[in-house]
Image (tube, coloured by chain):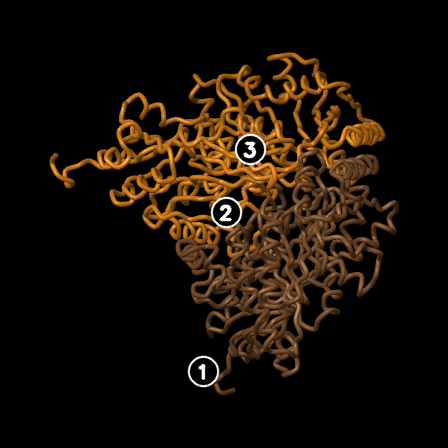
Chain colours: A orange, B brown
Amino acid sequence: MFGLLSKKPVDKLIEVLGREKVSTSLVERKLYSYDATPIPIERALPSAVVFPTSQEDVQKLVKVCYEEEIPIFPRGAGSGLTGGAVPTLEKGVVVSFERMNRFQIDVDNATAVVEPGVITYEFQQEVERFGLFYPPDPSSFKYSTIGGNIAENAGGPRCLKYGVTREYVLGLTAVIKEGEVIKTGNPVIKDVAGYDITKLFVGSEGTLGLITSAVLKLIPKPKARGTALILFKNLEDVGRVVTRIMTSGIFPSALEFMDRDAIRAVEEFKPVGLPKDVSALLLVEVDGSPQSVKEDIKAVEELARAMGLEVKVAEDEESAEKLWTARKSLGPALGNLRTGKINEDVVVPRVYLSEAIRDYRKVAEKYGLLMAIFGHIGDGNLHVNLLYDKKNKEEEERAERAVDEIFEITLRYNGSITGEHGVGLTKRKFLEYQFGPVGMEILRGIKKVFDPKNLFNPGKVIAL
Amino acid sequence: MFGLLSKKPVDKLIEVLGREKVSTSLVERKLYSYDATPIPIERALPSAVVFPTSQEDVQKLVKVCYEEEIPIFPRGAGSGLTGGAVPTLEKGVVVSFERMNRFQIDVDNATAVVEPGVITYEFQQEVERFGLFYPPDPSSFKYSTIGGNIAENAGGPRCLKYGVTREYVLGLTAVIKEGEVIKTGNPVIKDVAGYDITKLFVGSEGTLGLITSAVLKLIPKPKARGTALILFKNLEDVGRVVTRIMTSGIFPSALEFMDRDAIRAVEEFKPVGLPKDVSALLLVEVDGSPQSVKEDIKAVEELARAMGLEVKVAEDEESAEKLWTARKSLGPALGNLRTGKINEDVVVPRVYLSEAIRDYRKVAEKYGLLMAIFGHIGDGNLHVNLLYDKKNKEEEERAERAVDEIFEITLRYNGSITGEHGVGLTKRKFLEYQFGPVGMEILRGIKKVFDPKNLFNPGKVIAL
């Protein structure tokens, strides 16, 4: 022992948590410095990876980090696409929640208490055994964690009808500041006492504190589902159909859009028989009682036919599954076309969709890039994919420049730079465009209330 | 002219807004110093009532108020029950939004832009003409305003399925600090850029700034509705039925509960033929396609019968309407039993409902008061009504003491002191119990970020 003064900060962490919860191995430090962000970003080797197993552990580690001014980089499954989980300072530690993965379902109350490291899909499977439903379905749901989903306010196709992760978080326990615990909300749906700190945490990307548990809302599981496929010759008709559906008393559980190049990518990758000569297609999913599903699908079919459009109805579970597999295989399918892919998740008000898509396409032309667009058209959330050859540095740079223009178009149409992926590192500069100086000042002010030393995921979302 | 120095603050307001927008008449100042709070509260005669007609007006008035340190008390329709709209400082001005009542519906985008003074019901009627739906239904909806609803995060019976006001606010424009404008969110459902300032404003009761417009989400209007009535001999069975319904694939649009004394009050006030010999009843409403409504009502009927309970199904629109009228007339019906009524809107997790109700009843017994309980049982939100004789001061005091114990019971069961009415003035001291010292420090910190001089609705929700 050389006394506390000469001790390295990481040794203090080992002292309070025990060696089995603090890894300083080079391999692990390297492994935990990556997430799924597809473009080159700022990155540093952390000084350690910490694996808390309880709220007490989290409190202890935050206390040490606050004393020693160690930056904290929280991490779920590392499936994020904007660098949210990536450490950027060498003094920093990655806090991985993989060992905090317990959950408890309260069927009578239709709520659950979950730790952040719970895998979303595993939780959903268990919930559905009781006739209940936890809707959030980011495409990473089979491996991403509830904690990560909350930090990013994750969404997916079902969010049109069921809302994003935020709508299902009733309460949170989090460790903030120098290790203080804040408990927000309750296992109840309605609670209007005080400011909504729960929802402020959702989507804050780990910059306000470390979530140690969440109370989630569960809803009744729909009994049946049905899927129809509408084919388009003209992009302009897509918006018209969406409006007709949404004003006819049908509330689709998903409205997914694929453009020509997205369709081609799927058919080249894993053919399911989608027609390659259309300019776009729409997958319409409805859910509810078996009878209402039949009625709704019939109504969708009739209104689309009345507009002169071709419609195909999935006659059984299997053919519906096939269509959804096509939709879900878009990611790998596009990866099959080119080695590099930038997938932006912009959102534009539905009314401007065809105009925005036309403008995005012009950007692709201008930079000579392959572009495929698909997404959750019911809520205006489009995945604009720029494809390039990873080995061609010049093409990669062109793709990055094109992204800037895509964001500019999005903001011009009153949209948002991110509907699902978050800001992280990669969209920080565009956040300023969206919020303006007054808004940014407020965001910084709030950050300081929770994290006066700027140690929780510093540099993410906003630069202080 | 005697120069700026000798001018009274109110004169400055008149100078920038014009005389027709600033009233200093004693009658108006008196009128605008009240809201619907049923118990005696702190109250002051404001120095003026201001009627802005545009965002520019609001900016101008906030600038003057910040320069002159005039407290600002924003007001919708004044239908609040916790003193949120009541001025408490004589130097203060009431800002009434009644002249800012324009709105614009974008059918294709399923959104609307509304000013704060729009009457909720009028807006809903217009929305439904287009096959769309704005669900929030506080019982004041026929006269309360969207601005007030947002400030209080208003809810009602439909919130079980459709969520509270918060879920429908996509974006806001607000005037904060010294008159700066903040624009949050966009006319899109998904937006995960930066912290969720929109939802932070919802339910903040006018303490963070003045909302000048909101972007609201609209959803498809359900085509049909159906209602069933379940009667109970034992209170304990209520929770069991609710769980059975919610885990059988049915998502009721409302699950309303009335206890014995609430039923009696209705029958004495305006009889609709409710059985007076039961200990409780449950109104179950479902909505959706006509066929699914039939199926769901039948399923509810069967599962209740299988549990040995008596069920009545409303055979037509008219008999359903009759049942809902009974539910909605509970307020006046209770007023008919006694001149004084304290209506608390506590929330307890559904699993503890029968225990909590039993404990609430004990409080009524202890203080020798008449108590009637009804509410939105699906989300655990109960209206616990204490009835007393207004002329009997001693009884009134007993009722106020009983309220304290009701809140204590609620918090013991992990509940919330308010599900709909907000904190305002009347529940301030209980907020501390619910949030604890760390939470209160965070609330205060956030308040200061938006309102460094504590001039926006000072003293409401939290005391600085």
Task: Name the residue located 79 percent from the left edge and 39 percent from the top edge.
Answer: B301
Say left or right for A359 vs B338: left
Q: Is residue A347 above or below residue B260?
A: above
Mark 3 crowdedness (10 Å alpha carbons): few <14, some 14-19, many ≥20? many
What label sits on residue A396 in the rendered view? none
Q: Tell me, yes or no, whether the two marked residues, 3 and 2, touch with CB atoms within 8 Å.
A: no
Return the chain for callout 3.
A
What label sits on residue B5 in the rendered view? 1
Q: Is residue B263 above or below residue A322?
A: below
Residue A399 can be seen in this image: yes
Return the chain for callout 2.
A
Residues at marks 3 and 1, CA–CA distance in whole angstroms: 55 Å
Looking at the rendered image, the quarter that the C terminus of chain B falls into is: bottom left
What percent of the width, then of the height, locates residue A15? Answer: 23, 35
Q: Amino acid at mark 2?
A: Thr
What label sits on residue A198 in the rendered view? 2
Mark 1 crowdedness (10 Å alpha carbons): few <14, some 14-19, many ≥20? few
What percent of the width, then of the height, locates residue B130? Answer: 79, 46
Labels 1 and 2 in the same subunit: no
Task: Name the residue located 81 percent from the left edge and 41 percent from the top edge.
Answer: B223
Residues at marks 3 and 2, CA–CA distance in whole angstroms: 24 Å
In the rendered image, the residue lying farthest to the left is A2
Q: Nearer the viewer, residue A7 or B171?
A: A7
Quarter-of-image position of residue B297: top right
| For discs 3 and 2, the disc positioned in front in the rendered view | 2
Residues at marks 1 and 2, CA–CA distance in whole angstroms: 46 Å
Return the chain for callout 1.
B
Residue that mark 3 sits on? A345
Q: Amino acid at mark 3?
A: Asp
